[in-house]
């Protein structure tokens, strides 16, 4: 039988997600045994480890999962770090490429927010480079608040090989994730 789940994080609900997506989230360290989930049709959330289908994802005794190399964003706001805490600021300066497609709002509010994070330069219409100590999730969360419902955002952390995005839809999200993982796997093989 095919199930889907929603995930509750800090009062925000994300999903629905398929079993394959939930396995991927667990493997990336973004879904933990204590993450609150509900199956499609359920109103009450419970720990992922208490779900009969998801419990197997947490059975293996493994060390703390490595931080994932990317983050996804498919909801209207908030972080999607389901089972993992990421510092608001790493204290390390990172270099970002930010691209937006603004269809419903003025770009000036978004650009102002980008410049609040550090040294930034518009490299083309609706695209910037940014140097900041803020984490990719902090930047994404702040910028999403400046977007409308039909606007899209993509943030790449060139320093840490991470990406975050907003409002691309499930198919594009899946393709971005596959390409990002494949590129990093090829890079790891080349250096290893």
Image (cartoon, rainbow, N blue to C red):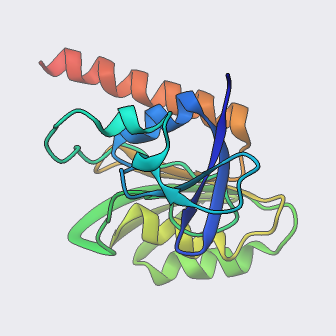
Left or right for 23, reference 89: right
Q: Position of residue 123 (x, y in %)?
A: 56, 57
Specify whether 77 is left or right of 191.
Answer: right
* Residue 116 vertical placement versus 114 (above, below): below
Residue at 49%, 44% (x, y): give it: 51
**As drawn, which residue projects farthest toward the right?**
104
Q: Name the image quarter holding residue 126.
A: bottom right
Identify whether 170 is placed above or below 84. Answer: above
Quick check: 179 left or right of 30?
right
- Residue 151: x and y, percent? 78, 59
Identify the residue at image location x=33%, y=59%. 84
Residue depicted at 73% across the width and 70% down the height: 147
Picture quadrant where residue 182 is located: top left
Task: Pick the residue in front: 57 or 168.
Answer: 57
Where residue 187 sits in the image (x, y, percent)? 27, 23
Q: In this view, does 87 lie above or below 40?
A: below
């Amino acid at each position: 039988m095919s199930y889907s789940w929603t995930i509750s994080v800090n009062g925000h609900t994300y999903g629905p997600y398929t079993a394959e997506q939930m396995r991927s989230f667990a493997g990336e360290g973004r879904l933990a045994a204590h993450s609150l989930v509900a199956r499609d049709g359920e109103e009450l959330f419970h720990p992922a480890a208490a779900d009969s289908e998801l419990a197997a994802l947490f059975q293996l005794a493994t060390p703390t999962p490595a931080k994932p190399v990317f983050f996804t964003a498919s909801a209207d706001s908030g972080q999607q770090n389901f089972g993992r805490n990421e510092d608001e600021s790493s204290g390390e300066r990172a270099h970002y490429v930010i691209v937006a497609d603004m269809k419903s709002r003025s770009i000036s509010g978004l650009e102002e927010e980008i410049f609040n994070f550090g040294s930034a330069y518009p490299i083309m219409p609706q695209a910037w480079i940014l140097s900041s100590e803020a984490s990719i999730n902090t930047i994404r969360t702040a910028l999403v608040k400046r977007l409308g419902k039909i606007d899209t955002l993509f943030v790449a952390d060139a320093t840490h090989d991470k990406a975050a995005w907003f409002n691309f839809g499930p198919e594009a999200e899946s393709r971005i994730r596959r390409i990002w993982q494949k590129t990093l796997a090829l890079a790891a093989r080349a250096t290893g």
